[in-house]
Amino acid sequence: MGIMGLHASATITTGRILVVEDDPGARDFIVSSLRADGHDVDASGNAFEALRLLGRQCYDLIVSDLMMPGVDGPSLYSAVASRWPSNPPHFVFMSGLANTSSFEGFLKVIHAPLLPKPFKVAALRRAIRRILQPRP
């Protein structure tokens, strides 16, 4: 087993994460929280910028607002899934809407968690850990 094996099981798996959030305060808070956990994080304020970043860099996970001006979360997901059909990055969505029922079918189909805003960082960490550390 050795020291490395012990250490690896005790730490959270870190990953490359892209945060897509049009609210600068929320975006900065999420980015700083994830960086504090050791993740490699990039951020964008809209889906167009996110797609530009995705063209240059691979990400393990995209944390995206569900409702954004211009292109919403589901449209961003569709663009990402069509560009990387065999291995799209995982998504975690966030929403400040009280009623997200119109998105329920979409979220079920793609198996993406939805965090209602405002959420605690612990809830985001749990969602990310479940995705980056799948149970054997």
Image (cartoon, rainbow, N blue to C red):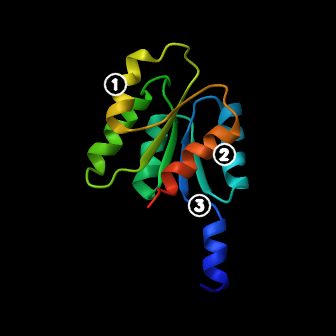
Q: Outermost residue, bottom direction?
A: 2
Task: Specify whether 110 is left or right of 62.
Answer: left
Residue type at the position of mark 1: Gly
- Which corner quadrant holds the N terminus? bottom right
- Where is residue 125 drawn, in percent x and y? 63, 46
Closer to the chain start, of discs 2 and 1, is 2
> Looking at the rendered structure, which numbered label has been put on residue 105?
1
Question: Where 99 sits versus 89, above or below?
Answer: above
Q: Outermost residue, top direction?
A: 99
Residue at the (69%, 41%) spot, across then down: 122
> Looking at the rendered structure, which numbered label has been put on residue 28?
none
Q: Residues within 10 Å of mark 3 (few under 14, many from 20)?
A: some
Camera-nearest label, 2 or 1: 1
The one nearer the camera, 136 or 7, is 136
Residue type at the position of mark 3: Thr
Residue at the (65%, 65%) spot, across then down: 11
Indicate the secondary structure of the residue bearing disc 2: helix
Task: Specify whether 101 is left or right of 3.
Answer: left
Indicate the secondary structure of the residue bearing disc 1: helix
- Where is residue 82 drawn, in percent x and y? 27, 44
Separation (CA) of disc 2 from disc 1: 28 Å
The quadrant in which residue 112 appears is top left
